[in-house]
Image (cartoon, rainbow, N blue to C red):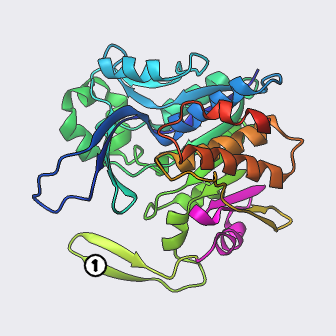
Amino acid sequence: MKCLLAVGACYLDTILDVDHYPAEDEKLRASSILTRRGGNCPNTLDILQQLLDTDAGIPTVSLALLAVLPSSSSPAYQEIRSSFNVSTDLAHCICRQQINEPASSYIIRSRVMDSRTIINYNGLPEMTAAEFTAVADKLGEENMAWCHFEVRERKSARFCYDMYPNFFLLDLTLTMEFCCGKGRIPDVTLQCLQHLRHHLPTVTISVEVEKPGREGLQDLAALADVVFYSKSWARVCIPKSHKAYFTFITNFVVMKGNGYESSEECLRSQAPLASKASLLLCTWGDAGVGALELPTLRYRECPAFRTAGTDTVDTVGAGDTFIAGMLFALTCRAEWDLDRKLRFANEVAGRKVVQEGFRGLGGCMRHAL
């Protein structure tokens, strides 16, 4: 059975619930605290594995994660390992054996604003293109059916060296790749996609275009078969037809533009840039999701799923849940039409936001399988 390989960061999340966001220099007591494993791809694999386990049919894919993790002897690694279903393969993950601290997220959820603020910290040196190609070539086309990428922020060589100088002294190859500019995201991801296209052309590629302000995401979309756009990215994206201008504030450059006002506008504008894609999707919060089939330019829209009599409890990972639902539908339900695939993925995401975490979501979808 071929695998679906998800490539992205794995975090340990600390979630604090507060009545309101603290002002600067304010001391505030949280009403609850929750620690759990996070990260886009790990969350997606968690739900996807639940759906596969719930499905009564013959499994069509197995699941594997490629992420940079701390030392395999560290408590953090053991916590991450135990958080996954035993069926999810972590053998391809890259352990930085000199580092014990995991990538971490601190999430503040405000009751008054019904929103969350996320602070990330990741001192682990990023995966290099050479490390990815070694995994991909080992798996080969005979063992890998799909490769899904989450794209993260660039991290400088200076930052990584300052944090863990001894690690770089021990790994001269990795040191050289970072110093030559090869250790940056999404630059590395672009090299990974190019390698798949040239050496493993039968592998289906999907990419998340999620976080605004990250350069090079459109270049990645140009090489993907399936692209997931987020509302947050679409609202600040500079359409090609609009002239952008720049505002310089100290050492930062801020690009201003009109952005897209709907999922359809985003997808139709991005379609010419996604020359290899067969499907583009854009989630739009309460307005649901839009999908554009290529090359027909057939547009479909599906409203958000709502459970009567329930309130939103936890939106962390809702986008990851939608992606899991779509990946399941695309890999395991080829006989479904696009409308049904969208309804299924929307329902999984809709059920997720009215509960804490991801546990039991697969069982909730048994009726739809």
Residue at 51% x, 53% y: name it.
311
- Residue 111 in the image, given as x and y percentages of width and height: 34, 56
At x 23%, y 69%, the residue is: 251
Residue 122, image x, y percentages: 31, 40
The stretch of residues the image draws in magenta is 261-289
Q: Is residue 345 visible?
A: yes
Q: Is residue 351 above or below residue 166?
A: below
Q: Position of residue 310 (x, y in %)?
A: 56, 51
Choose top left, top right, bottom left or bottom right for residue 339: bottom right
Front-lying residue, 85 or 178: 85
Quarter placement of the C terminus: top right
Residue that protrudes farthest toward the front in the picture: 309
Question: Would residue 280 be counted in the magenta stretch?
Answer: yes
Give the quadrant of residue 161.
top left
- Look at label 1 and name its amino acid: Phe
Residue 296 in the image: above or below residue 91:
below
Most foreground residue, 347 or 82: 347
Q: For this view, does 163 lie left or right of residue 97?
A: left
Q: Residue at x 65, y 23 (%)?
A: 139
In this rendering, is residue 19 above or below 329? below
Asked whether 18 falls inside the magenta stretch, the response is: no
Q: Which one is nearer the viewer's eye here, 80 or 167? A: 80
Residue farthest right in this picture: 335
Decide which of 366, 151 is in the foreground and name it: 366
- The picture places residue 163, in percent across and down from the top left corner, at 20, 37
At x 52% / y 76%, what residue is drawn? 238
Quadrant containing the N terminus is: top right
Q: Secondary structure at mark 1?
A: strand
Figure disc tally: 1
Which residue corresponds to mark 1? 248
